Image (spheres, coloured by chain):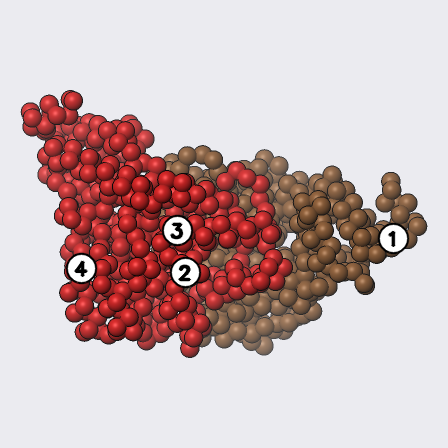
Chain colours: A red, B brown
Amino acid sequence: MSLPQVGHLDPYFLELMEDIKSLLRYSFQTTNDFTIPVSGTGSAAMEACVCNLIEPGDVFLVGCNGYFGYRLVEMGKRYGAVTQAMVKPWGEVFSYEEVKAAVEKHKPAVLALIHAETSTGACQPFEGIGELCRKHNCLLIADCVTSISGVPLFLDKWGIDAAYAGTQKALSCPPGVAPLSFNKRAMQKLMSRKTAVANWYLDMRMIAAYLTEGGGGARSYHHTAPISMCYALREALEIVREEGLESRWRRHQQVAEGFWKELEAMGLELLVDHKHRLPTLTTIKVPAGVDPKQVTSYILSKYQIEIGNGLGELAGKCFRVGLMGVNARSDIVLTILAALRDALEQQGYQLKPKQKMRAAL
Amino acid sequence: MSLPQVGHLDPYFLELMEDIKSLLRYSFQTTNDFTIPVSGTGSAAMEACVCNLIEPGDVFLVGCNGYFGYRLVEMGKRYGAVTQAMVKPWGEVFSYEEVKAAVEKHKPAVLALIHAETSTGACQPFEGIGELCRKHNCLLIADCVTSISGVPLFLDKWGIDAAYAGTQKALSCPPGVAPLSFNKRAMQKLMSRKTAVANWYLDMRMIAAYLTEGGGGARSYHHTAPISMCYALREALEIVREEGLESRWRRHQQVAEGFWKELEAMGLELLVDHKHRLPTLTTIKVPAGVDPKQVTSYILSKYQIEIGNGLGELAGKCFRVGLMGVNARSDIVLTILAALRDALEQQGYQLKPKQKMRAAL
């Protein structure tokens, strides 16, 4: 990010953009031509999916099993969708049968599922859902904010038509741009819209004209891109490519498994079933008698480590610990465990003798 | 920007945000409480003004004397405004009488004027317009993208109700966040809207809840802010504060005056009348027989200096030279003059003997 600025129509920047697009395709496991960084943070890329792919009156079915599903519903309403929330308790995921029943019932034009629910730590399986959507002529949107490069993710193989992600999670890049990918089905819907995209800044028809038209001078100006953030994203994606996605996924999984084992050994309970647990984001139930905000602020001030508090329905009930990208390492796990143990003991939480012994190892 | 990341709800980041808000107030010359960085580039802050302050059916009057006025009209349409374009040739500005006549005729709910037209280099006077808008119960929006900290700008004194700016112009900060300020009249309209803000990411009611509610933990999460960009903006604004606005405005003016004199001595013609010329952005008419794109790409490849080509109506007719922030210096002017002279001569443009002599000095 410390590199000198160039103009957003400079040939050098356009080359940089091509690098980013190509590296993003790898991280998303897609060949989608329209795979780009949105000039905002993850929520902007989320809104870009909604405002470009939904026309007023479209039925928009959303899997709501955490904070971000409900946000999609809220966005859908603003863009005139007939929204249908498919609801599950926070921390659970939808089975194929549940999704199938809801799609058959509501006949949505667009279905959105949260691949990695940052608020709960649950990982939604996608097997079969892409085909289901094709059969019902429905577009499939996936929220990959906390999954990209940290958890197996296959846009093309799973038949995901549109996906968005965050840079500040497993990609270990500062927030400020956000990955987005539309496949041909999504682009076709976008290009044949009957109504204008209500959102100007996120209008992907105009962005496509900027990003894809001929060479340097011919590209039409839309908005100034965040140059430094694009430098950062290229570097982060390049680091992913160097490590390799499979190694990276394995590293995240191994590190998280070790963390979970130790947490359970400390007598702590995890919110999400092992089968659907995200390695990138672990939700720990707050033990009885413990004030979660005191724990997180103690850890922040004493150890300079930020642990998240519960969001929405889980406010006050969970800690959220991210082990993402550069932080998915066993030395980081040991530090967090020590900090958490210290903070919980400050709150009067008693480790059992056996747990204490283990903790001392 | 190379500082370590912190969370967007970290107390340190909230302090940083308070610094930015206070420094932005100084650069905008306002006491508006709601003075913030938008998490996108200048166009996002522009859209934030439109989508928050316009309700469907509102008459939206826009001064169109360049590219960015027309963009506001386009945005207004998307948010359901009844748009009225007040038109002038590109490079000219509106007189008070012209604005008054248009306001009386169209009775707009919102009037927008481009203080500094980045596409033409014209600087719109605002004297009396704030009062006029108050008299007609109309909100006044000003585009300050290319004026903030480079040209005298007084939000409060001029009665501007909402303003947006860019960071990558006279503030000399990379693009990625964008200044925005709403006064009480604007906030009142926002808070008493009958309809929801159609745009979720730029919904300033939700941003206000995040930015102003109580202390650290009490603030409600909206979206992840671009942390590194906020570091950059604070530093850029701090540099403005150190130099002082008046010195900075004077520096921009003096440097531009010197540039204009030399351009005229070279026999080149400027688009905008001296009286309304922006010191930050100079538009030079392309001399007959010269291919402007060849000139700008020659200068870019030989000197690594980016000179803009004409936008919209001025495409192929003008060069646009920015002397903004760190680049508003006489040594930069000398370099640009030399590069421009070289490039024009390559194109067969002949300096007169007297001009040649001057150029050799």
Q: Nearer the viewer, mark 2 or mark 4?
A: 2
As drawn, the residue found furthest toward the right would be: B353
Amino acid under label 4? Phe
* Disc 3: CA contacts within 10 A as few (<14), some (14-19) or many (>=20): some
Helix, strand or loop at label 2? It is loop
Q: Which mark is residue A32?
A: 2
* Numbered disc 1: secondary structure: loop
Mark 3 or mark 2: whose residue is earlier in sequence: 3
Q: CA distance from mark 3 to mark 1?
A: 54 Å
A146 up-or-down from B192: above or below: above
The answer as to whether the residues below labels 1 and 4 share one chain is no
Query: Residue A294's quadrant in the figure?
Result: top left
Q: Chain of mark 2?
A: A
Residue A345 visible to an observer of this rendering = yes
Q: Secondary structure at mark 3?
A: helix
Q: Chain of mark 3?
A: A
The CA span between labels 3 and 2 is 10 Å
In the rendered view of the protein, which quadrant contains the C terminus of chain A?
top left
Disc 3 + disc 2, Cβ < 8 Å: no
* B52 vs A296: above or below: below
- Residue A166, compared with residue A304, is above or below; it is below
Identify the residue shown where x is 29% and y is 74%: A137
Among the two numbered marks 2 and 4 on one chain, the one whose residue lies closer to the N terminus: 2
Quickly name the residue at label 3.
Answer: A26
Q: Could you tell me the amino acid type at mark 1?
A: Leu
Could you say which is closer to the camera, residue B144 or residue A60?
Answer: A60
Count every numbered label the image shows and give the total: 4
The residue carrying mark 4 is A94
